[in-house]
Image (cartoon, rainbow, N blue to C red):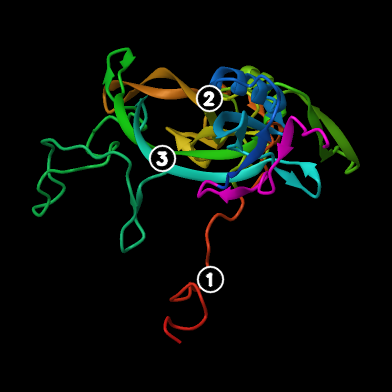
């Protein structure tokens, strides 16, 4: 009689399931099953120890999650090992790649201290006359019998013209706290796990002459460590340079044996301002997250000592980076379905 092998794989061994989540993550689970017939397998401890030797912790990109042994009599056992990968590696054309998962957005309220009223003026009336950026209420000599005494724009009726300066008190321009809304959003992408703190392939780009070049890429964690709270150096999500701020990056717990990892990036948008005035000073451009610093001088207007903007400094206070070094494309991939959805999952109504 031939010797019986101590490990006999069952016919259904290797059966499993590939699943797609709503976040765009693929996962796979499968079971390996075998009959254990080694001599001396007395008790669960011995059977489990033998099964663990046959089923390693990691197997072809999957991690063992549990091993079950069941006695079937005669010293034989059925051992079942379950393997899982909750986030499979992303490949495109056979190569590892980053895959878009999801995004979400919100607006939040911020405030800033401003010392100047809006310029250019707020608009025009039906006759095309410009609406001034400041109006003054008070008692002044009426221009005619129908004039009720205001409001008047500065510079009229002896009213001192501060050229939009707010809260002037002697030598100080106190300003006011202005609330405003910031558009924030998060994007989640799926990365190959070894790109998080390991080598990534070079990024293809073009130099100033239009020639194709390869830009070496550091591990993702290194790029994030060095560049958080940076703004975009190039156009990103359709917004001009300096207008999108990377405010944070987070990742869920990364388990041993994972093939891919989800990474969520947080951004805030501040719009570009062009061709506007601060007092009598014309500003050609202020990138979104630049800081505008205004210096005032003392003048007289309407027999009053006033403060007027003399110099305006546009200051870059955030460094800039190419967000493509994060592995992100310039434009967000299409995430929505714009096709008509059928009434049923099949082409004909149920019952036909």
Q: Whole-percent x and y of residue 119?
A: 41, 40
Q: Nearer the viewer, mark 1 or mark 2?
A: 2
Q: Which residue is mark 2?
A: 253
- Please state the extent of the stretch shown in magenta in the rendering: 1-23
Is residue 324 among what the camera can see? yes
Task: State the mark number for residue 319.
Answer: none
For residue 314, above or below residue 25: above
The answer to whether residue 345 is left or right of residue 135 is right
For the residue carrying disc 1, how many other residues have a C-alpha within 10 Å: few (<14), some (14-19), or many (20+)? few
Mark linked to residue 119:
3
Q: Does the stretch in magenta take in 3?
A: yes
Labelled pair 3, 1 in contact (Cβ < 8 Å): no
Q: Earlier in the sequence, mark 3 or mark 1?
A: 3
Q: Residue furthest bottom?
A: 352
- Closer to the eye: label 3 or 1: 1
Tell me the CA gap for discs 3 and 2.
50 Å
Tag 3's secondary structure? Answer: loop
Helix, strand or loop at disc 2? Answer: loop
Residue 339 image label: 1
- 230 within the magenta span: no
């Amino acid at each position: 009689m031939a010797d019986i092998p101590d490990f006999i794989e069952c016919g259904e061994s290797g059966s499993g399931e590939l699943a797609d989540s709503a976040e765009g993550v693929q996962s796979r689970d499968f079971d390996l099953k075998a009959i254990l017939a080694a001599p001396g397998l007395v008790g669960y401890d011995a059977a489990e120890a033998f099964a663990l030797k046959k089923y390693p912790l990691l197997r072809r990109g999957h991690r063992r999650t549990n091993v079950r042994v069941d006695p079937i009599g005669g010293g034989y056992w059925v051992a079942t090992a379950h393997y899982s990968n909750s986030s499979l590696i992303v490949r495109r054309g056979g190569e590892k790649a980053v895959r878009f998962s999801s995004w979400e957005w919100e607006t939040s309220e911020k405030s800033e201290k401003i010392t100047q009223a809006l310029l250019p003026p707020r608009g025009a009336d039906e006759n095309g006359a410009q609406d001034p950026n400041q109006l003054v209420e008070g008692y002044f000599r009426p221009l005619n019998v129908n004039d009720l005494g205001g409001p008047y724009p500065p510079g009229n009726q002896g009213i001192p013209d501060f050229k939009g300066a707010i809260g002037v008190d002697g030598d100080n321009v106190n300003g006011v706290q202005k609330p405003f809304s910031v558009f924030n959003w998060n994007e989640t992408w799926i990365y190959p796990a070894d790109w998080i703190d390991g080598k990534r392939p070079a990024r293809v780009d073009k130099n100033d002459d239009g020639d194709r070049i390869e830009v070496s890429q550091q591990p993702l964690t290194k790029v994030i460590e060095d560049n958080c709270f940076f703004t975009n150096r190039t156009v990103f999500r359709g917004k001009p340079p300096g207008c999108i701020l990377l405010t944070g990056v987070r990742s869920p717990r990364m388990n041993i044996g994972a093939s891919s990892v989800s990474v969520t990036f947080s951004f805030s948008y501040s719009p570009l301002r062009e061709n506007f005035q601060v007092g009598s000073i014309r500003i050609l451009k202020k990138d979104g997250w630049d800081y505008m610093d205004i210096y005032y001088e003392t003048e007289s207007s309407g027999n009053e000592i006033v403060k007027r903007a003399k110099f305006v400094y546009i200051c870059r206070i955030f460094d800039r980076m190419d967000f493509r070094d994060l592995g992100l494309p310039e434009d967000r991939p299409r995430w929505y379905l714009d096709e008509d959805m059928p009434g049923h999952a099949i082409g004909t109504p149920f019952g036909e």
